Amino acid sequence: MPLTPTQLERYRRRLEEMRRRLAESINQIVPTVLSDAQPPGEHDRHVSESPDAELAIEQDEEHLYRMVREALERIEQGTYGICQRCGQPIAAARLEALPYTPYCVTCEAKLEQRR
């Protein structure tokens, strides 16, 4: 069943808030990652205990940011809530848990098995 305009607007607001928070988080992480990537002695800032962990966090945040942005694009295109793989509606419970998901549970499971 297609989402109602009210539901779409609620998801749009939620995704826009997620996008804003992720952008802030990325903007805070990037300088630390860049600083930690410099050779020792070339910066005065505190070097974190785990630059690899910070880089992984940044990459995860950027990946999630892209997914949120793509979900907002699907809202604009009128395809939000439809699985990008099989074309079936994505369950409401899944959209509540992962509003940025492009796949239904079945297709996501198939994709995960291939990875």
Image (cartoon, grey):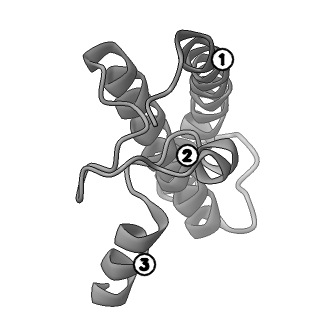
Q: Secondary structure at mark 1?
A: helix
Q: Quadrant of residue 6?
A: top right
Q: Quadrant of residue 8?
A: top right
Relative to 112, is 12 on the left or the right? Answer: right
| Residue drawn at 33 percent across, 50 percent down | 83
| Residue drawn at 38 percent across, 56 percent down | 103
**Is the C-beta separation of discs 3 and 1 under 8 Å?**
no
The residues tagged by marks 2 and 3 sit, at their Cα atoms, a distance apart of 22 Å
Q: Earlier in the sequence, mark 1 or mark 2?
A: 1
Q: Secondary structure at mark 2?
A: helix
Q: Secondary structure at mark 3?
A: helix
Residue 72, image x and y in percent? 42, 23
Q: Amino acid at mark 2?
A: Glu
**Is the C-beta separation of discs 1 and 2 under 8 Å?**
no
The residues tagged by marks 1 and 2 sit, at their Cα atoms, a distance apart of 22 Å
**Quadrant placement of the C terminus:** bottom left
Q: Which residue is mark 3?
A: 109
Sort mark 2 into few (<14), some (14-19) or many (20+) by Cα contacts within 10 Å. Answer: some
Q: Earlier in the sequence, mark 3 or mark 1?
A: 1
Q: Amino acid at mark 1?
A: Arg
Sort mark 1 into few (<14), some (14-19) or many (20+) by Cα contacts within 10 Å. Answer: few
Give 73 or 103, whichever is nearer the viewer: 103
Q: Which mark is residue 10?
A: 1
